[in-house]
Image (spheres, rainbow, N blue to C red):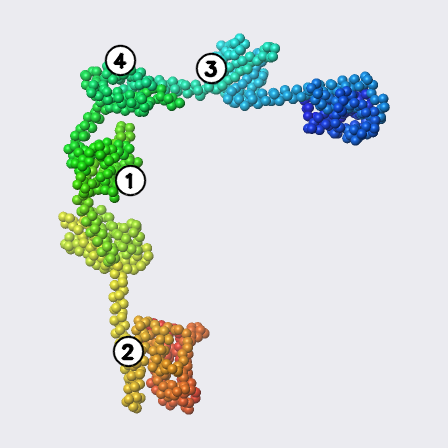
Amino acid sequence: MMIGSASSLDSVPKQSFADIARLAAELCRTAHAVVCLNEADQVRASACYSRNTEGARLAGALCAPAPVSEGVHVVPDLQQDPQFSHSPLTAAVRARFSATVPLRTAQGAVLGWLCVLDPEPRPDGLTVDQQACLASLGRQAVTLVELGQAVQRNKAQEILQARILDSATDYAIIAMDRNGRVTRWNTGAERILGWHEDEMLGDPAHVFFTPEDRAAGRPEIEMALALRDGRASDERWHLRKGGERFWASGEMMPLTAEDGTQLGFLKIVRDRTQQQNDAAVLHDSEMRFRSLVEVSPQVVWFGDAAGNLTYCNPTWCAYTGLTPAASSGDGWASAIHPDHRERVLGVWRHAVATGGHYEVEIPLRRASDGQYRWFLARGKPVRNAAGALESWIGIALDIHERRSAEQRFQALTELSPAIIWFGNPDGSLSYLNDRWYEYTGQTPSEALPLGWSTVIHPDDLSGLLQSWEEARSRETLYDTEARLRRHDGTYRWFLIRAEPQRDEAGKIFGWLGSNSDIHDRKHAEEALQKAQDKLRLAIAATDIGIFDYDLITGDLGWDARVCALFGLSPDAPISYDVFLSGLHPDDRDWVDRAVQAALDPASGGMYDIAYRTIGLSDGVERWIAAQGQVIFERGRAVRFIGTARDISDVKRAEEHQRLLAGELQHRIKNTLAMVQAIANQTLRGATDLDEAREAFAGRLISLGRAHDILTQASWTAAPIIEVIEGALCVHRHASVPRIRTTGPDVQLAAKPALSLALALHELATNAAKYGALSNESGFVELRWNVVHEGAAPRFCLTWSEHGGPPILSEPTRRGFGSRLIARSFTSEMGGAVSLTYAPTGLVCRIEAPLASMQEQKAMAAA
């Protein structure tokens, strides 16, 4: 059977190598034959033949190195030859005999070898004929390999050529046979012409010629010219697949074999539509330009690089009467006024020598009447791509009227009392009238073009220059103020203004300005500003707001202070309706009537009222005092100006003073009533006048101290510590504390504070006379706290005496102190008082609702 393996020579049929292997095995009468070829630096079996199935193991097997001999290398018994005894190829079929011929090229390169194998050793080897046939088959294998390599090289060359053709996408490259039928159509042909290659192969190429060219036999003419001259070039219209015409340049060449036999034609087409269109546009532009030049009402001229005039349009000839020939070279200068001829020619020669722009004003003679008119001549050099000057182009504009106007302008400015100046677009000055030189003492050479800035006050110069640059960049009115130095060294204020001057196209060609002396007005304004600043400071110091009501337009203006009085932001919209809506509802009607009354001429226009506002955004009530004056013109109210200030603090102070006066009156009455009660109770049960006087005085002193404490707290609330200290201070001794107090800080209302102070005074007085403070060892514990139990917290105070004379029995008669304590804390405070006369000392317990001890309404009962 035959077995073939993959080979790098894909272009050679593998059956060819398999046939060689079979012929070799048959001729040499061996069981196996194999063709081994070099592949990727290794030698493998490429084609095999075997008479049995063992040959399948030969396919792709590695082969031993080729023998170095030139002819057939025979090994009768492989087991006896150490070089081949372990070869993978011989081991694959357990061969004992082999005969090998190398596949050597004419250049000596070994491509592989042809080998026959047999499982039986052959001492006699091969016959001479068999060796010759085996060598012939080896040469045939070499021929097949070289043929495959040549085919591969040809394919690679064809692929490269195809890629080159397809990469030329800007060109349509078309190959044709001798009859003009397409054999090759590159990517550029597809892009330019629209047909794909598979659409065109085998069809005539003349399909992309126009119908009129096909009818005229143009494709056949081009082929004939190509055969005759070697190439045929043309530029003409062609067709795309969609029928669209395009301008193209084409070239056709014959294709010939090496022996000169004609194979066909090669046609190359390039799309030149854009170039054709550009050329047409350029031609049209040149025609339009020439037409414009010919009909232009202005003089248009051309010159060569050397400065010789080469062309003047008909306007020049009609105005000067010079023919084109008479105007060439320097002949045009004969039309210039003799007094200006050399000046103008000098400017022109300088421009030609330097290659710069040319601009000059020229008086030219008019041929019709011999009069001279002023023209502005301008020229511009024309350079090539390399920057070399090739020619000149220029115009001459009639500026006679403008120049006359400038002369009239100069005459007027010389008579003007103000400083008049003219600025160039770049910011420099080109003209200043005589007033400038008279004022500053400068000369024209000192002032122009930029020397004028030296007379500006140093403090004003930077701001003036900045505003000047800003006006030029914005192309708007220039308006500023600055101080200018006079020839005597003093400075005066000037208003400096300038407007841009534009030509017919709207382009600025200069600035016309004036400087007006405003020194006296400036000082008046500064004085007014100082007065306004003083007024503003005075208003700020008094916190007064300003309102201004224009009665003609209805505009109402408020400053920030007035807005704040109505609870508005400074930028809030203001009107008379807003004013009325911001008033207290109770004041709105009568304030409106007061305003209307002030607007009556009979009233004199005076306005002085106080009213309440309700802040429109914050809801705060404020009292406002407003004063104003209405201004009348011809009996008609035209303006209402006034002030407004916040008098809420004054109103609150007045209200507080009124309340204090009433409270004082009430306090005096209550105090007198309490003194009267103390006096009655003290004297009613007194048996000794001195004792009564002492008790009465002590009670009044305690009452006075309690009043002092409440006065410091404005009769609102007093801390219990201060009340206790004030009531017991006369019974305390610095050396030994006899009255021990403990308890939290509790704020007491006025009435409970007075009652507690009198109660403690009574307890301390009795303790000093009869109880724990009557000897040297006794002491008093005074404790108080707030108990949070039940529905509402309660105030509890305990007076307990210790170490005094023992109490043997409860007193049979209640004194004034006991009655005072009981009445104050039971009927008036809603509390309870208990007195316990224990043998160890008196215990007094006072308990009352905390709310009754702290409510301010208790003041009314004091």
Q: Which residue is mark 1?
A: 466
Asked whether the residues under the numbered discs 2 and 3 touch, taking CB atoms below 8 Å apart as contact, a structural biologist would say no
Q: Under tag 2, what secondary structure?
A: helix
Query: How far, Cα to Cα, is label 2 from label 3?
Result: 132 Å
Q: Which residue is mark 4?
A: 326
What amino acid is labelled 1 in the image?
Gln
Q: Position of residue 5 (x, y in %)?
A: 73, 27
Asked whether the residues under the numbered discs 2 and 4 touch, taking CB atoms below 8 Å apart as contact, a structural biologist would say no
Give above or below for 133 relative to 842. Answer: above
Mark with earlier residue (4, 3): 3
Q: Nearer the viewer, mark 2 or mark 3?
A: 3
Q: Under tag 3, what secondary structure?
A: strand
> Which residue is at 47% across, 17% downward?
248
Query: How far, Cα to Cα, is label 4 from label 3?
Result: 44 Å
Q: Nearer the viewer, mark 2 or mark 4?
A: 4
Asked whether the residues under the numbered discs 1 and 3 touch, taking CB atoms below 8 Å apart as contact, a structural biologist would say no
Q: Under tag 4, what secondary structure?
A: helix
Give the side of residue 380 with respect to residue 44, left or right: left
Residue 671 - label: 2
What amino acid is labelled 2 in the image?
Thr
